[in-house]
Image: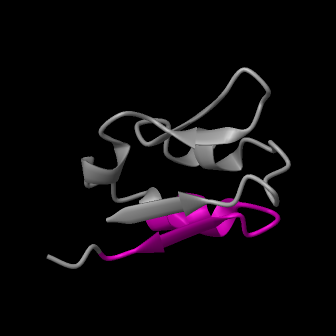
Amino acid sequence: MHIDIDKDVCIGAGQCALTAPDVFTQDDDGYSTVLPGGEDSGSPLLREAARACPVGAITVSETVT
């Protein structure tokens, strides 16, 4: 999976980190960021976390090999 967080759109609501804490966290400024290995975690909640973002700052797509 490829996860993109639009830092210009993110408001730091933290819904992604609450929904999928094994994939997302918040940086020192409170904005969402992907944890190391988060893209490869296989978390079943990854897409739900993206949908939970109140401003739609998270995009999840399949990686092309």
Quadrant housing the N terminus:
bottom left
User: Which one is nearer the viewer's eye here, 54 or 26?
Assistant: 26
User: Which one is nearer the viewer's eye here, 58 or 13?
Assistant: 58
Q: Is residue 54 shown left or right of residue 4?
A: right
The location of residue 52, given as percent across then percent down, is 67, 62
**Which residue shows up at 34% across the image and 52% down it?**
39
Colour convention of the picture? one colour
Quadrant location of residue 58? Answer: bottom right
**Which residue shows up at 36% across the image and 43% down it?**
38
Region in magenta: 47-62
Q: Is residue 7 shown left or right of residue 63?
A: right
The location of residue 56, given as percent across then percent down, is 73, 69
Which residue is situated farthest in the left direction here?
Answer: 65
User: Which one is nearer the viewer's eye here, 36 or 52?
Assistant: 36
User: Which one is nearer the viewer's eye here, 21 or 5?
Assistant: 5
Quadrant housing the C terminus:
bottom left
**Which residue shows up at 53% across the image and 65% down it?**
48
Residue 50 shown in magenta: yes
Which residue is situated farthest in the right direction here?
Answer: 11
Q: With respect to residue 52, does 11 lie above or below?
A: above
Q: With respect to residue 2, does 19 lie above or below?
A: above
Quadrant location of residue 12? Answer: top right
Residue 1 shown in magenta: no
**Which residue shows up at 25% across the image and 55% down it?**
42
Quadrant location of residue 31? Answer: top right
| Count of picture labels | 0
The location of residue 64, given as percent across then percent down, is 22, 79
The location of residue 35, given as percent across then percent down, is 44, 35
Q: With respect to residue 27, does 56 lie above or below?
A: below
